[in-house]
């Protein structure tokens, strides 16, 4: 399987964005633009450490616990990062202005491979700009550079996957991907689907899709969506099944080269109260890492429109991998070491904890977590105080038992189990318990990845769990 593409660049967008932002800061971009931009006003702010250009690697980040989709640009040569959002934010109206830089700063790599994103500049949604000296720490990234990344930002208390979007995928023959939903706040019972929550009994928990491309045209086919097998019940089709096939477009957007579903949007009522149905945004990395933002409607109350574009996942969207061409080597997957995030979505808030799994000293036993002795189990947990700088490995207070690989779907583990120790900080009830889960596993550029969705009805609060792991050794 080969993923290729052509990077068309972001030059025009970057020029517009830089003109707008540096004018707002009272700066002259003569050296870069070759001319002085008139009409900048009398803004006397002297913020000086906003990068003058975007770093080289562009990633798209879906909306997960934040109000806006965003991009991250990460430069490992200059050791800098820039986060932008696209929407009305702070003192700017984006994307007309080319996006608003909400966070920027430097990056440094720890001994265990985790990357620290150290903020030197930020802007809040109210327009407050702040510089930090020394840099603000507590933001973490796990990355396979240019292939896939996972980020947890302290200021937004959320996890988000990052998919590179410097080129469109090139899939001459259909390639099958498997995915799991990135869940919103857990909702059990009821007969209607809400935009602010995820109901595992009604909505998609996991699925698969075949994707092929021809130029900018992207063809989705054999879309298969399944609810969560809750309380021993078998999974089934969601109550709002998406189309079995769909045609989309990949083109240059504010997020890079991304796929839009539907390819165009009809505005029913132009003007301030326009009706805009949800539109999904999908990115596919060079080795097949897939991320979907399911979108949301605007201009009308959610009850009058679908809460999201139902092409793949529900909730915030989906995260996925190419389906292995043969049964996955489960022994190899559980023998690997991983860094990633435990993402809890329950109550009125989300939890995002940096985590490590599969480290050598705890491959076969975990003193604080009684769990069955199986050949398909990964031990791990979060870092104390969510800080990996003090210890290369996290606590041992969670375990993932992948269980049996589905006989008909390579890389799918439909009866996975997550064990939560009494000492886990978000346990809530003070005893060890287990959570049913569905996991997918595969490889990204020769490295294992494990993505999981679980439904926790035992802990407090009841919540949906996501665990997202990239091999680190």
Image (cartoon, grey):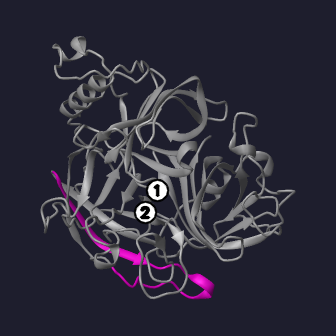
Q: Locate residue 123: give its quadrant.
A: top left
User: Is 29 situated above or below 341?
Assistant: above
Residue 149 relative to residue 311: left or right: right
Residue extending farthest to the right is 367
* The quadrant where residue 273 appears: bottom left
* Residue 113: image location, x then y, percent: 61, 35
| Sooner in the amino-acid sequence: mark 2 or mark 1 | 1
Q: How far across and how far down the image is residue 132, in percent?
A: 55, 25
Front one among 327 and 17 = 17
Classify 25 as above or below 433.
Answer: above
Q: Name the residue under label 1.
A: 64
Give the magenta part as a residue range: 216-241
Q: Can residue 111 be seen in this view?
A: yes
Q: Mark 2 points at which residue?
A: 316
Is any part of residue 174 visible from this angle? no
Q: Give the side of residue 356 with respect to residue 210, left or right.
A: right
Residue contact between numbered discs 2 and 1, judged by CB atoms under 8 Å = yes
- Between 470 and 15, the one nearer to me in the picture: 15
Relative to 385, 134 lies left or right: left
């Amino acid at each position: 399987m080969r993923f290729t593409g052509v990077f068309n660049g972001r030059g025009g967008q970057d020029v517009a964005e830089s003109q707008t932002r540096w004018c707002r800061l009272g700066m002259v971009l003569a050296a870069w633009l070759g001319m002085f931009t008139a009409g900048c006003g009398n803004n006397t702010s002297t913020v000086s450490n906003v990068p003058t250009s975007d770093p080289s690697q562009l990633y798209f980040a879906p909306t997960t616990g934040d109000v806006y989709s965003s991009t991250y640009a990460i430069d490992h040569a200059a050791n800098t990062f820039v986060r932008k959002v696209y929407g009305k934010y702070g003192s700017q109206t984006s994307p007309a202005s080319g996006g608003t830089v909400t966070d920027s700063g430097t990056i440094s790599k720890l001994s265990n491979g985790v990357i620290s994103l150290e903020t030197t500049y930020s802007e809040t949604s109210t327009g407050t700009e702040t510089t930090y000296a020394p840099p603000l720490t507590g933001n973490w990234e796990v990355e396979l550079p240019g292939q896939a990344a996972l980020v947890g930002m302290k200021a937004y208390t959320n996890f988000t996957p990052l998919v590179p979007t410097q080129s469109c995928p090139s899939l001459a023959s259909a390639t099958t991907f498997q995915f799991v939903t990135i869940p919103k706040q857990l909702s059990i019972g009821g007969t209607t689907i809400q935009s602010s929550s995820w109901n595992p009994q009604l909505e998609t928990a996991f699925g698969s899709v075949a994707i092929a491309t021809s130029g900018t045209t992207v063809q989705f086919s054999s879309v298969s969506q399944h609810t969560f097998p809750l309380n021993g019940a078998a999974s089934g089709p969601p109550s709002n099944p998406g189309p079995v096939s769909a045609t989309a477009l990949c083109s240059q957007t504010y997020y890079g080269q991304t796929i839009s579903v539907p390819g165009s949007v009809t505005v029913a009522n132009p003007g301030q109260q326009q009706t805009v149905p949800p539109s999904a945004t999908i990115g596919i990395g060079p080795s097949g890492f897939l991320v979907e933002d399911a979108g949301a409607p605007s201009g009308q109350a959610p009850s009058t429109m679908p809460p999201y574009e139902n092409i793949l996942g529900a909730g915030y969207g989906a995260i996925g991998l190419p389906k292995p061409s043969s049964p996955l080597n489960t022994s190899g997957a559980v023998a690997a070491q991983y860094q990633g995030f435990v993402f809890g979505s329950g109550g009125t808030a989300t939890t995002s904890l940096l985590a490590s799994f599969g480290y050598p000293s705890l491959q076969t036993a975990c003193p604080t977590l009684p769990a069955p002795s199986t050949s398909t189990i990964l031990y791990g947990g979060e870092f104390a105080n969510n800080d990996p700088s003090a210890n290369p490995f996290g606590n041992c207070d969670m375990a993932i038992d992948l269980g049996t690989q589905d006989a008909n779907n390579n890389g799918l583990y439909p009866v996975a189990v997550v064990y939560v120790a009494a000492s886990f900080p978000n346990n809530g009830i003070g005893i060890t318990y287990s959570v049913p889960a569905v996991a997918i596993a595969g490889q990204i550029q020769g490295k294992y990845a494990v993505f999981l969705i679980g439904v926790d009805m035992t802990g407090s609060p009841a919540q949906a769990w996501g665990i997202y792991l990239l091999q680190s050794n």
